[in-house]
Amino acid sequence: MTISKTFSAIPFGFTATPVTIECDSTRGLSMLNIVGMGNKTIEESRERIRSAIRNAGFSYPTERKITVNLAPAGLPKTGSYLDLAIAVAILTHFQQLPRQALADTLFVGELALDGKIRPIRGILNIIKEAERHHFKRLVIPSANSYQASLISPANAKIIPIDSLHQFWRIAMDLEPIPTLPKHVVKNTEKDTNAPLFDQIVGQAQAKRALTIAVAGRHNIILSGPPGTGKSLLASTIPNLLPPPNRAEIAELTQISSLHTDNAEPCTHRPFRAPHHSASRTALIGGADGLPGEIALAHLGVLYLDELPEFRRDLLEALRQPLENRRVTLSLARHKISYPADFMLVATMNPCPCGYLGSDDHICTCAPSTIMNYRRKLSGPLLDRIDLQIKVAPVDTSVLVKNTTIGTVEHETAKSLVQKATNTQFNRCGKYNSSLSSAETVKYCPLDAGTRAFLDSAAKQLSLSARSYFKILKVARTIADLEGSENIAKNHLAEALQFRQEI
């Protein structure tokens, strides 16, 4: 018998790595050996594959010692992605499947004991890898077809199947080749649990700052004493975010599918809110290469409540993603990079007790305690946050004064956000916060008087070069919210107002 060969792939970060499966056999006791640096899941696949082959109506060879090699042999392989490809290689080797069924085909899927095909994680990574390597056919689990329908490979035909037996029928021309169902992705999902602006009494300045931040995807931090509504204000953001377009849905699904078994597309922007006790692995990513909260917040929001309560090393790890919009994991043998274009929303108290500078309460913190508390936030980190505002307490006499709660205020803000977003993408194809220095100069022109005003403010406030450009970008967003083509002094003045010392 000649060696049979099939092809598969395993997700590797935001891409995938192709794997070649080779099958050979010799006379001997019935045995299935899988070599090629497979982990425990792949070792256990031997039993799944035996049962799946038998229960799918095929005969499992006896008195044959089967060797399956996973190449490249030096690449560590994890997960159950290779089950289907291994089973097809064995069946082809023993002439139960025609060899032409393997031509230019990549197989991926987990086998159940009854021969059914279960969904896998990272299917979009694998589809893109199959396209890069010019495979003409890609056999995937039917349960992953909804995700797979988000992208359309140019030269690769995607074949969704339910079972090993169904693939045999397709290979033997007993059943037509199934096609991906045409799903219509709707961006109508709404977080009904998130509060609206209308439900928050007062805090007009904070609401305005949040509207600007969401419109231009600017980073924002809210500082104030306990009970002023900082967390409540931040929780209104999910209902302010514009819905993702089809390309963004595919990108969001590509990341989220690496982390969860959900086979549905991700049709809403993520709002990730890790607790301040989160580990470095949870926030940045683990040794297994899976994305952490920073990558999972891509195209959405990373919300850090009580920012100074996070470990300093975790906060400093945010500096690179905030600047480069990517997070890189350095593992033992390789590096993995994920996109991390998120909007950072943070809240904090002015001191551990929360009442530093308050007119109504006495701060009980020692100076050294306050210094250690605020030392968690380095200058370079704060310099990367576009809007920094203080949230003042609301007079309790007006908290329950208005008993009728509508949606006008929130819907108005949401409409402005969508309008400003459209303006930005029509102008430069990206959010204002994503503009480079050269693009900022190009898309944020100032007349002589307005530039002199900004230069004077920059000297008085000792703004860094980064802060200078951030003020320009925020002012550009404010102008977009007002429908103004040019940046005026009042736009810059408001942008400077949201750069308070917290």
Image: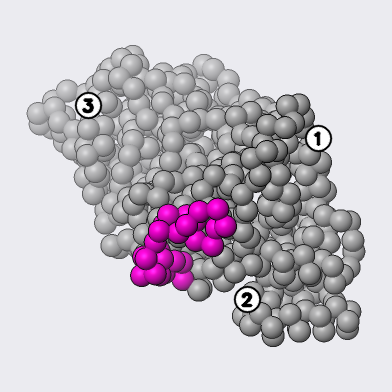
Could you say whether the residue bearing mark 3 is in a helix, strand or loop?
A: helix
Judging from the image, what secondary structure is the residue with disc 1 in?
helix
301, above or below 474, in the image? above
Amino acid type assigned to the residue bearing label 2 in the image: Arg
Residue 246 sits in which quadrant?
A: top right
Residue behind mark 2: 466
Amino acid under disc 1: Val
What residue is disc 3 on?
47
Which stretch appears magenta?
A: 352-378
Of residues 463 and 257, the one nearer the viewer is: 463
For disc 1, the marked residue is: 408
Q: Tell me: 499 left or right of 381.
A: right
Please tell me whether residue 374 belongs to the stretch shown in magenta.
Answer: yes
Q: Distance from label 1 to label 2 (Cα)?
A: 36 Å
Q: Nearer the viewer, mark 1 or mark 2?
A: 1
Q: What is the x, y in percent for residue 9?
A: 41, 45
Q: Amino acid at mark 3?
A: Glu
Packing grade of label 3 (10 A; few <14, some 14-19, many >=20) is few
Say left or right for 92 vs 46.
Answer: right
Residue 384, disc: none
